[in-house]
Image: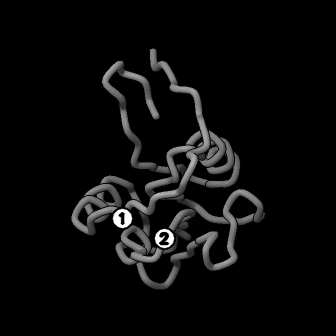
């Protein structure tokens, strides 16, 4: 059974960029079909995951660009991203409701085995 770490907002926001190879690997694990709409809910400036999606049916949100995933009602089949860790559970909650087929999020496990 998984144990979950308490979600605490950071005192300052650091930007963490996902290496393209890691994004491509995670996207490759998701059974995306050509007609599926794929969302990157936390695209960031590098758009590592977004660039790995099939080009015709891809979508993205990035709060720095005025699109807040958590505040926007969306329709998509898959959500795949490296979410802001302090917002992991709200992202999971929203994607589990909206994503028609599923979601895959890159997460961290701390030294005690808690999912962050």
Residue 16 vs 37, above or below: the answer is above
Q: Residue at x 51, y 73 (%)?
A: 35
The image quadrant that residue 73 belongs to is bottom right
Q: Quadrant of residue 8?
A: top right
Q: Residue furthest left?
A: 21
| Residue 60: percent from left, percent from top | 56, 73
Q: Which residue is mark 1?
A: 17
**Labelled pair 2, 1 in contact (Cβ < 8 Å):** yes
Spatial CA span between label 2 and label 1: 8 Å
Residue hosting label 2: 44
Out of 78 and 1, give the one closest to the viewer.
Answer: 1
Mark 1 crowdedness (10 Å alpha carbons): few <14, some 14-19, many ≥20:
few
Residue 91 locus on image (x, y percent): 61, 48
The figure's colour scheme reads one colour
Q: Quadrant of the N terminus?
A: top left
Residue 80 x %, y %: 47, 58
Q: Residue at x 35, y 73 (%)?
A: 52
Disc 2 crowd, CA 10 A, few/some/many (<14, 14-19, 20+)? many
Left or right relative to 83: residue 29: left
Q: Which residue is at a point 39% across and 60% down the rendered structure image?
A: 16
Please report the residue visible at 44 percent of the width from the left and 63 percent of the height from the top: 15
Left or right: 5 with respect to 73?
left
Position of residue 17 measured from the top left corner of the image (x, y, whole percent): 36, 64
Does 11 sit left or right of 50 as displayed? right
Res. 30 mark: none
Dot 2: element: loop
């Amino acid at each position: 059974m998984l144990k979950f770490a308490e979600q605490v907002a950071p005192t300052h926001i650091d930007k963490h960029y996902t290496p393209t190879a890691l994004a491509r690997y995670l996207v490759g694990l998701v059974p995306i079909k050509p007609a599926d709409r794929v969302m990157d809910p936390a695209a960031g400036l590098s758009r590592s995951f977004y660039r790995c999606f099939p080009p015709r049916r891809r979508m993205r949100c990035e709060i720095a660009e005025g699109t807040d995933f958590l505040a926007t009602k969306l329709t998509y089949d898959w959500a795949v991203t490296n979410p802001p860790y302090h917002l992991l559970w709200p992202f999971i909650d929203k994607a589990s409701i909206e994503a028609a087929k599923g979601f895959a999020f890159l997460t961290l496990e701390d030294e005690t085995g808690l999912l962050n």
